[in-house]
Amino acid sequence: MKIDIEIDEKDLKEMLKDANLLTPVEAGFSVPYASEVEYGTGPGTITPFDELDEWARLKLDMKNTAEREKFVNKVIENHYRRGKLPHPFFQPAINKVIMNINKIPIQKEGIYAISGAIISESKKNIESKGIAHKGNLGMSGYARRVRE
């Protein structure tokens, strides 16, 4: 899951004087299930057993393997029948950063600072929504300059 970040030249004409703002940047989360967390899933989606098993072991502190396996299989069946609810963390971060863009120190880092702020805000959302237990979701956040 990623988003390419660009600045609208009309709205931010003064900012574009800095060459750092012209460098393409991408920001996102590299774990394969990031978009499932952000947007949810529809019925018919199969959730990997290992992902849920690890979640149940860590988040729910289920130590008994047989009980955990039974529980995880029920959750997988439920996800398959009903889908998974969305837990947006990325888009709200983008919105918050855009609303507070004048508070971001972009003089040296340009648009890279904006993408870093989005990832930082996303990680806060992951923690505050309690979805940090989803493996390495928060740790997979990245912001990088794209070389063309």
Image (spheres, rainbow, N blue to C red):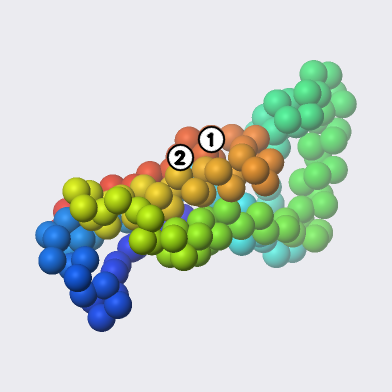
Label 1–label 2 contact, CB within 8 A = yes
x and y percentages locating residue 93 in the rendered image = 51, 56
Left/right placement of residue 122 relative to residue 24 reads: right
On the image, numbered disc 1 is attached to which residue? 136
Residue pushed farthest front? 103
Residue drawn 40% across the image and 50% down it? 117
Element type at marker 1? loop
Left/right of residue 142 with respect to residue 21 in the rendered view = right
Residues at marks 1 and 2, CA–CA distance in whole angstroms: 6 Å
Asked if residue 116 lies left or right of residue 42, the reply is left
* Of the pair 8 and 130, the residue shown nearer to us: 8
- Picture residue at 67% right of the left edge, 58% below the top: 86
Residue displayed at 76% across by 53% down: 79
Residue visible at 61% across and 57% down in the picture: 88
Residue 141: percent from the left, percent from the top?
44, 43
Q: Is residue 51 visible?
A: no
Q: Which residue is mark 2?
A: 140
